[in-house]
Amino acid sequence: AQKVTQAQTEISVVEKEDVTLDCVYETRDTTYYLFWYKQPPSGELVFLIRRNSFDEQNEISGRYSWNFQKSTSSFNFTITASQVVDSAVYFCALSEAGYSSASKIIFGSGTRLSIRP
Amino acid sequence: GAVVSQHPSRVICKSGTSVKIECRSLDFQATTMFWYRQFPKQSLMLMATSNEGSKATYEQGVEKDKFLINHASLTLSTLTVTSAHPEDSSFYICSARWGGPTDTQYFGPGTRLTVL
């Protein structure tokens, strides 16, 4: 069975601090996707990244970076120099990959991030 | 990027009535659509998977007679909450799968249902 664990329920930091959101996953699939989504108070999900299980390279996009460690089944997300606009709930998620797959996305429980001015 | 819309964005109804929520892929044909439910301060939970022209596949614990899903075309799926009760109040989000080269899912903006 697939499972995504986000152990941090809530995190609060002061603006400009770096913050890392943890994500650990479980799957028996050999090919899968990992995702991070942002959900601001409006409720609409904002796609941040999708990573294929074959690609363990770390990714950087502006102030955002992701660390994929297949050996520890982790896909952590770091925001550097955090800003108040980063305040939101962040979800890590997992799905089977491949056109023949059902492609259901399984979400973690989310981490509520609050950035204080 | 591709766009998925949901209508209505908010709905308030009386207990016992039925509510229909539409999910449309505006600029692509969706091979599969998914319906999720999110209670306040909780995660998104998959309710069902629907493929155009066939019956939806419901997740364990989701009542298929209460949550009717119709996927009549490659761009439209509807979720009908029948005989709604206050405990059905939730945020309902759909996603549409585009089976193109990137095989990507796109999420709708969500529908907030409040049952009085």
Image (tube, coloured by chain):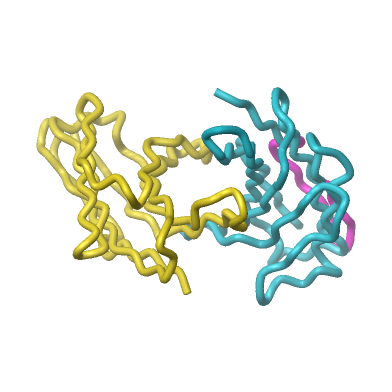
Chain colours: A yellow, B cyan
Q: Residue at x 80, y 37 (%)?
A: B74
Is A14 or A5 nearer to us in this picture? A5
Q: Residue at x 49, y 59 (%)?
A: A106
Q: Residue at x 57, y 57 (%)?
A: A104
Q: Is residue B81 magenta?
A: no
Residue A41: x percent and y percent? Answer: 46, 39
Q: Is residue A84 left or right of residue B45?
A: left
For residue B20, above or below residue A96:
above
Q: Is residue B12 magenta?
A: yes
Q: Is residue A76 left or right of residue A46?
A: left
In the orientation shown, which residue stands out farthest toward the left?
A17
Question: Which of the 4 quarters of the picture holds residue B56?
Answer: bottom right
Q: Is residue B41 left or right of residue A25?
A: right
Residue A54: x percent and y percent? Answer: 33, 49
Looking at the rendered image, the quarter that the C terminus of chain A falls into is top left
Residue A1: x percent and y percent? Answer: 47, 74
Question: Which of the 4 quarters of the picture holds residue A74?
Answer: bottom left
Is A10 or B22 nearer to us in this picture? B22
For residue A117, above or below residue B65:
above
The mark total stands at: 0
Residue A30: x percent and y percent? Answer: 40, 62
For residue B39, above or below residue B109:
below
Q: Is residue A80 left or right of residue A112?
A: left
Question: Which residues are the magenta region?
Answer: B7-20
